[in-house]
Image: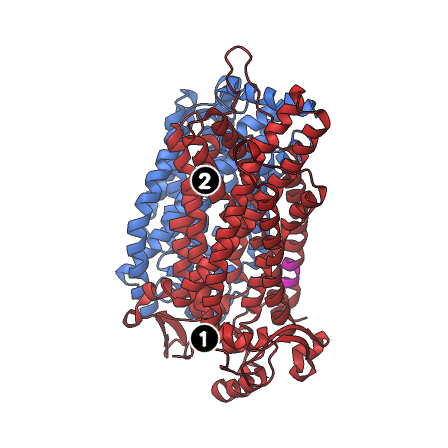
Chain colours: A red, B blue
Amino acid sequence: MEALDIARWQFGITTVYHFVFVPLTIGLSLLVAVMQTKAVFSKDPARKDAWTRMTKFFGSLLIVNFGIGIATGIVQEFQFGMNWSEYARYVGDVFGAPLALEGLAAFFLESVFLGLWIFGWGKLPEKIHLLTIWAVALGTTASAYFIVAANSFMQHPVGAMLNPETGRAELDPSQGSILAVLTNVTTMAAFPHVVSGAWLVAAAFVTGIASWHMVRHHNKARDLGLETDEGADHHHAARDLFRPVVRFGVVAMVVSAAVLVVSGDFQAQIMFKQQPMKMASAEALCETETGASFSILAVGGPDAFATDCDGVTHLVSVPYVTSFLATHTFDAELQGVDDLNAQYKEQFGETVTDIHGDVLTADYRPNLFVTYWSFRLMMGLAAFSGILALWALWVTRGKGDSARTTGSKLFQWFAVLSIPMPFFANSAGWVFTEMGRQPWVVHPNPDDPTIRLMTTQAVSSHPAWMVATSLIAFTLVYGVLAVIWFQMMRKAALKGVPLPRRDPETDELDTPTLSFDY
Amino acid sequence: MDAMLDPTALQTLWFGLIAFFFLAYFVLEGFDFGVQMNVATFWRRGSRTRGTVLETVGPVWDGNEVFLITGGALLFAAFPEWYATLFSGFYLALLLLLLVLIVRVCAFKWRSKVDSERWRTSWDIVHVIGGFAPALLWGVAFGNIVAGVGIDENHWVTTSLLGLLNPFALLGGLVFVLLFWLHGTLYLALKVTGTLREDANRLAGILVWPTILAGAAFLLWYQLAHSHAGWTWIPLVLAALALVAVVPLNRLRREGLAFTATTTAISGAVVTLFGGLFPYVLPSTGDPANSLTVANASSTEHTLTVMLVALCILLPLVLAYTAWAYRVFRHRLSDEDAPMPGSELLEKAKKGYREAFEQE
């Protein structure tokens, strides 16, 4: 493998890895903020007690997760310079700005206020302490916005022009400059999609874990009998501690799903205009078609997908759906991969000169196997969340004294199984959008294609062994940390919450303080 | 050649702002590194004391590290050419730094998440590495930045990793380690009570001597051999005086002033290094025409203006809430007791946890 391929693998591995933890941090910080708000403003001591315990429980999971997101984020920023220095030179005048804004407006906010939240209980008034977790949630969300704005410039450059003297992209005041970059239509579509994707991760996480404990306590209560004190305690835990959280998680899943669908639909339409090649490769659509169908199953070895579009056979397809996704009309014409490739060769040249001055044959097709399947994986995995939401809603139906919980082992295990699915869907979505952009690192804007850079022109001039060293080092360290992270999350999640006790004399609940081990 | 050594006022201002972010990073994260090094010093006191030591920076280290992350991003935005050449050129050194920074964050976040002696001890080892290694690597990196490296006409660095490990840069690494160790020890003395406080003060009294020696040697070598400015004698002398002042201040147990003195020393050293680097940002040791300078490595005037406006709005806010956070956590921690003040409540909560656990 050449340095370019290794550098791409490294970017892929470190970014997908980073984005396992980040969506959970973004989503969970918001959900924990809502939980703590419920705890602070509950008048009923039993409700206050329940939400305080839940804030503490999910808060400690948030803290375990937060660290690894921060740690792996530093690599992302350094990597643009280390492995992609020619890219950094080409777009630095534009691309550095949103990264710097991310640091100034988001990272400081989340880091400083996370410290205040973890250590500030008892030192800060209750409501100020509540504000600190909201500041954390705001910071994590803002960081997603700025990084999506930076990424959107790579998908669809705006607000900049090519300086013919230096051959580099520069912010252009006459085209709106940084404001155009921050309000890029691509950003406006991708940001809600990314953030609601993060909410779904956290919502499924909360629903899954709360469901598991609800079933556990339900069964304990049944085994012990409601007439025993302990049995009553477990009954209380299932019905009054975890059931509300299950339903809370379901609401969050429904909200995320709605935003995901609307924003995803909008994204598909602008992708059709801005990156028709990505749209065609998502469908492994070889020839230009009118009223293109949506392929559900296609076969052909990886080679057939990668190098020879005609080797792909579509087995199951739904007519007209792809045309509808792209334009909201059934008979729209969609260009195929091969036609687009020929068109791009005419427009951007048959050859490309890499960083060493070598002239290579240009191929403007992304890896169809990856784009086709990652697109389907992203959408298909949502089925798990949908089933979980409906199932959880059904088993917890009823109000007041007839509020139900369930002892179903099948539901319990399905809930746990559903936790990782939105994580995979998020990764698949990013793999699709980044691999679908290839061979470009900065995809030309169809309205003004002067700013464009191919990946082969973006990489640093390193010997392969050097990049391989860092790839191996990162992969090993990340692997070890992933195992530790998983064990800690598992342990913390299994722990559950201590059951509330009433003081026999005062009849007061032993509601815990919002302290965290550190 | 002349144009490349003649930056505009805005470029000069941005060079100063980058210097400010590194200054803030070294002053703030400097004591975090030093505190982590002291996990080794107080190793034999057991994991509880090590926990107290670490907790003195618990609420603030994360925010301190953001000065690096934001400083790096600002470097990218304001001087993309510098960022690209530096980060690709110092590849293996930065790889090491990144690996250490990653595990260090996990050590902070995860150390007390599992109640086992072996677990805490393992992370304490990571803490010790996480204190010494980044300090050393930053020192080596800055030694090379200010002294210059081999750069070709593509602005690609030609100096290898072994070339980066030259005597001047290694001395820089040693100085950074000693200076941050002293700085962190004085911070510790400010934040704890009891015997730990006294021991920290005593340790600072010992550490100050090698720091003065190595620091003086490094800065004089730099000023005489590599600096491009004469005025940096002023911050250099200021740094030296501040460091010498630590000796009497430490003897009088004026902890606040002693910590202010090391803060001044670090600031003086950073100003000396950046001031002497100007108008270069990465000098070429070969053909001087290949050097990166403030003028030829920067973004356009427009981008610099945009970023300056953003910085003027956001930085005061950041500094305000950071200062507030330091105020909230201004109290001393005691040597022996539980990980948190208000330990009674904590004990009660822990008891509740334990009861709930044992019943299952």
Q: Identity of the amino acid at label 2?
A: Val
Viewer-proximal residue among B211 and B188: B188
| Residue at the spot of label 2 | A34
Q: Which mark is residue A274?
A: 1
Give percent across and percent down for residue B15. 35, 56
Residue closest to the eye, B134 or B150? B134
Q: Is residue B196 magenta?
A: no
- Residue B171 visible in rendering: no
- Between A57 and A468, which is closer to the camera in this rendering? A57
Magenta range is A466-471
Task: Please determine whether, in this image, residue B301 is positioned above or below residue A201.
Answer: below
Q: Is residue A469 magenta?
A: yes
Image quadrant assignment for residue A285:
bottom right
Distance in Å between CA atoms under marks 2 and 1: 37 Å
As drawn, is A332 to the left or to the right of B255? Answer: right
Q: What residue is at 45 percent from the left and 40 percent from the top?
A: A34
Q: Residue at x 44, y 46 (%)?
A: B66
* Callout 2: SS: helix
Disc nearer the start of the sequence (2/1): 2
Main SS of the magenta segment? Answer: helix
Parent chain of label 1 = A
